Structure formats: structure tokens, C-alpha cells
Image: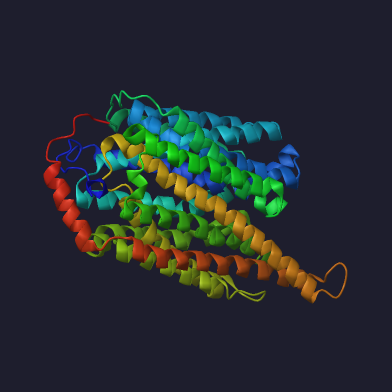
Amino acid sequence: MSATLPASATDHTVHDPRRWWVLATVALAQLMVVLDATIVNIAMPSAQRALAFNDNDRQWVVTAYALAFGSLLLLGGRLSDLIGRRRTFIIGLIGFAGASAIGGASQSFAMLVGARALQGAFGAVLAPAALSVLTTTFTDPKERSRAFGVFGGLAGAGGAIGLLLGGFLTEHFSWRWTLYVNLIFAILAVIGATAFLHSGRGRSQRLDITGAVLGGAGLFALVYGFSRAEPEGWGSAWTWAPLTAAGILLVSMVLWLRRAGNNALLPLHIVTDRNRGASFLAILVTGAGMFGAMLFGTFYLQSQLGYSPWQTGLAFLPQIVVLAGCAQLSTNVLLPRLGPKVMVPIGLTLAALGMVWLTQIDVHSTYGANVLPGLLVLGAGMGTAMPAAIQTATLGVDREHAGVASAVVSTAQQVGGAIGTAVLNTLATSAATAFVVAHATTNPPAPSVLAGAAIDSYTTAFRISAYIFAGGAIVTVFLFRRRAATLTAVKAHAAAAAEPALAAD
């Protein structure tokens, strides 16, 4: 049971006066990685015109990032355990900034896609290192709650912030600045990392090459298969073949990890613990479900209400504010009293209700009356569930495994996003096609029919997102331990882990 408990409060970093600067540095890096998943999306039409690539190629600007990021996360997390968190963090920052500079300077479609893949690779190094730095720095329960409230809030709001910032930069500067802006984030974070993060030796242990190959290839096939579902269809070999391969590779990885024990790429006790397993599931669900609001909400605001990219980003701003406020309230006040068994399902239920509200939109809807209330309830749900899940997912992980445990958090969010994008896109497209078939009386269909088909596709995506959130709420309420059992385990671990940490990270 000790694997589920927090590290000793005697850790040397608890009273480090630089720890809040560490939080600021980590938060800056986390924001850069998370918002990059959406910031380029809103600039896509401008980039497409500048580099003259077609609609079929456009998806690879997003997919290249997702493939590299998703497939290399476990390896990136293990590297931070083996070579030291500070070193890995800085390597990730510099590499991400360099890839962003190449992407911003792109003169061809191939150059842009290559830069996005390189961004994803270094993001897979950076994201787990950032979270593991936070996990090993904040071990005092009250301070840990405050720090994870900030981090979890950014994890949930990063996509919306990306839309806001991307819209502003595209409209007032250039699409290239959606990539160049990362250099500003990275430079500030490198300065902070150099000044405030502890240096450490890491662990003198061999890297689990077999586990890394199986895990990386399996996650690559999984993300690739889901990314092909919308353009190719679920019956296409381009979809089911990589998904089948992913299943075989990931099962093989689990079998290998059982043999490799504690030296494995991912020690299995990290994911088999009930509280952490429930947290990883909740993070996957939020990653899948929130794409319903982000992706199709953006479509609705721009295509139906005629919003510009900058106006679309501003439309999500109230959601960000509510999410940030609920993240602090959840982790600092409610989670210590109620525990994740209450907080995470409540958050997912609120998110489901927000999506249900959005299913009511039609061709005559307005932002203030029909969109904003749903976004606010969704923001409250995400702010309640996401930070609590992330904090619980890394609670009690041994210091030497903090990096790979953090990588599982990012992997769950990334895989959830890939699944959500594929499923929602496919179902939304099918709904639009069925609507046209049922209502069109002319060829081509009348504009009113096309508008109705678009609305039907959006509401279908919102409804499926609501089902995803509701299903996650039901499952997690049974998976999480009761608060009393968790507190008993916390006290037992605190007594057993009284000696100071032996190494700084």
C-alpha cells in the first residue's frame, strides 16, 4: 500500500525558499507544451495559404506533433529519472525552442511537419520532467495542493489558452508567431531552471531498451490508428491495422514489464494502484471529452456565429477564469477534506452537464445565452476534476520513479485526446451526412440544409462528450479508495519514510 502515499515531509526541498520560483518555472514550461497542441490549429488556414499545401495534408501538421509526443512520453519520463530532472528539463526546453524556431521559419510543408514532429519529441522529454520536478519539490500537503492547483489548472486550460493566444497572434502578427512565441516561454523557463532547480545525478541504472521500443511503437501505432479514423474510416486497413498492432505491442510490453520488475521502463505498481489507476483513467477521459468543446466549439463560433480567430479565443476566456478558480478551490480546500473519490466524479459530472447544455444549440443560438453557460459549467468541472486527478496520480510515487509516473499522466491525456478527436470527428461527420440525406431535396443541398447538418454534427459531438464524461464519473467513483483508507495509508507511509531523501533532483 505504501506505493500510493506521499513522500516524506522531511524531504530537503520542503522548506527550500526557491520552491515557488520552481513552480513558476515549471508552470511556464507546462503552459508552453499544453497550449502548443491547439495554438497552431487556429493559425492553420493562414499557414496553408502561405506554404500552399492542400486540405488532405493539413492534418499532418497536428498529427506529426501528436505522434512524436505520444509515442515518446514513457521514454522521456524514464530519462528524467535516469539522468536527472533538471538536466532533462533544460534539454527539453532548448530542443522544443529550437524546433519551434524551425517551424516558424518554415519555407515548405515538409519543413513545417518535420519541425512539429521534433517539437513533439522534445515535448515528450519536457512534460514528464516538469511534472516530476513539481512532484519531488512539493511534499508538504498544503503546499503540494496549492502547487498542483496551478499545474492542473494549466493542464486543463492550456487548450483554451492556445486558442486565445493563437487567435491574437494570427490576427495581429503572423501565423509564424504561433511557433516563435515558444522561444519567449522557453528562454524564461531556462533562466528559471538554471537559477532555481536543484541539480542531481539521476540513477545509475540501465535504460530498459526493450520496454522503450515496445511502449514507443505501441503508443505510436495507437495514436496513428486513431488519427486515421476520421479521414479513412473505421473499416479502413489504415485504421484497424495500426490499432491491432498497438494492442499486440502494448500487451507485449506489459508481459515484458512483469518480467523486468523494478528496473522496467514502467514499473507496473505505478499503474495498478487503485487510486493512481483511477486518476489515470480520469485524465484520459478529460483528454477525450474536452475536445468536444474545444474543437467543435471553435467550429461553431467561427462557421455559424462568424467569429474571427481572436474573437473565438476571447469567447473561451470566461471558461479559463472559472477553471482556474475551481482548480485552486478544489485542490486547496475541497480535496484535502473530501478526497479524490468525491472530487473527481463531481468534476466529471459537472463537465458532462456543461456538454449537455451545449447540445441545445441551433441555427438561431447566441453566444451569451446558449454557449457561454455551457462553457462555464464545463470549466468548473474541468477545474474540479483535472488538478485532483493529477495530484492523486503522482501521490506517493518513489522519487526514482517520479519521472515515469509523470509520463503516464501526460500519456493518458495525449491518448485521450487522440481517441476523442477520432471518435468525435467520425460520429460528427456521420451525423452531418445522415442529416443531408434525410433533409436535402435539391442537389447541391440548400444552404439551410447544410447549416442544419453542421449544427447536427456539433450537437452529436457534444452529446458523445457528455457520455464520455458521465461514464468516467461512474467508473471512477467505484475505483477510488475511500478517504479514510487513504488517510490510514498516508500515516503508515509517513512513519516508514522518516529519513531524509538521499539525493536532490
For this orientation, the residue located farthest to the right is: 443
Give residue 331's position: percent from left, percent from top: 29, 57
Relative to residue 164, is residue 440 drawn left or right? right
Relative to residue 213, is residue 175 drawn left or right? right
| Number of numbered labels in the structure image | 0
Q: Does residue 194 appear in the picture of this structure?
A: yes
Give residue 104's position: percent from left, percent from top: 60, 34
Relative to residue 349, is residue 440 drawn left or right? right
Give the image quarter of residue 350.
bottom left
Quarter of the picture containing the C terminus is top left
Q: Residue at x 31, y 66 (%)?
A: 342
Q: How is the image coloured?
A: rainbow
Give residue 227's position: percent from left, percent from top: 62, 48
* Camera-side residue of 116 and 319: 116
Q: Does residue 181 appear in the picture of this structure?
A: no
Vertical order, 423 against 466 (above or below): above
* Camera-side residue of 166 and 422: 422
Give the image quarter of residue 294.
bottom right
* Camera-side residue of 118 and 288: 288
Vertical order, 57 against 232 (above or below): above
Q: Residue at x 41, y 41 (%)?
A: 407
Vertical order, 60 against 299 (above or below): above
* Camera-side residue of 54 and 285: 285
Q: Residue at x 14, y 40 (%)?
A: 10
Give residue 354's position: percent from left, percent from top: 48, 70
Vertical order, 503 against 468 (above or below): above
